[in-house]
Amino acid sequence: MIKDNKILLALKKRGFGAGKWNGPGGKVEKGEEIIDAAIRETKEEIGVEIINPEKIGIMRFHFPYKQDWDMEVHVFLVKEWRGSPEESEEMAPEWFSLDEIPYEKMWADDKFWLPRILKGEKVEADFVFKEGETIDKHAIKVVRSFNFKN
């Protein structure tokens, strides 16, 4: 979520990625569309109903040392919503100035793709992590648009 030259991030309090700043999100339930999962997860995790989310990225994460962590993440930019971000059992939201994003307290990949998205690019990226959650290799490509279903 972006507003007034600030980005809303949330500190993950439990589960995968605990202790890292992230955007809200989670797993797609059986029979659920990706966009519907993004809307549901944001409501559950920070109490906000997002409006007109724009798909701006697909990130594929590979963990050769722990393959059950492998995932594909769909990233949405949100500029409209109803409600105020509130802390939940899972996440504690906080606004950050765009020039003070806490990359050192986020996943290692964020510093590669997030600045590009904030400049208006849409990206597809692959990241391979090695133990210690550091990046072994990565590839990022700019795309024109995304089909909402993918």
Image (tube, rainbow, N blue to C red):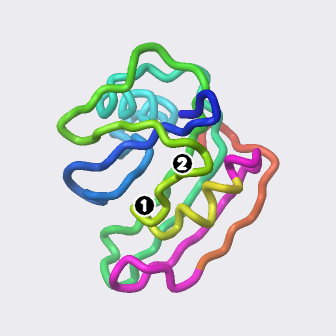
Q: Along the horizontal axis of the image, is 69 left or right of 96?
A: left
Q: Taken as a whole, is the magenta stretch helix, strand or loop?
A: strand
Task: Residue 6: give x, y in percent of width and height.
Answer: 57, 36
The first of marks 1 and 2 along the sequence is: 2
Say which residue appears at 49% left-offset and 61% top-offset: 103
Residue toward you, 113 or 149: 113
> Residue 76 lies in magenta, yes or no?
no
Q: Secondary structure at mark 1?
A: loop
The segment highlighted magenta reads: 117-137
Task: Residue 147: give x, y in percent of width and height.
Answer: 69, 40
Q: Along the horizontal axis of the image, is 24 left or right of 136?
A: left
Residue toward you, 131 or 58: 131
Q: Secondary structure at mark 2?
A: strand
Residue 74 bears which disc, if any? 2
**Residue farthest right in this picture:** 144
- Above or below, 84 against 93 in this view is above
Say which residue appears at 54% left-offset and 48% top-offset: 74
Specify the quadrant of the image occupied by residue 79.
Answer: top right
- Above or below, 15 against 1 in this view is below
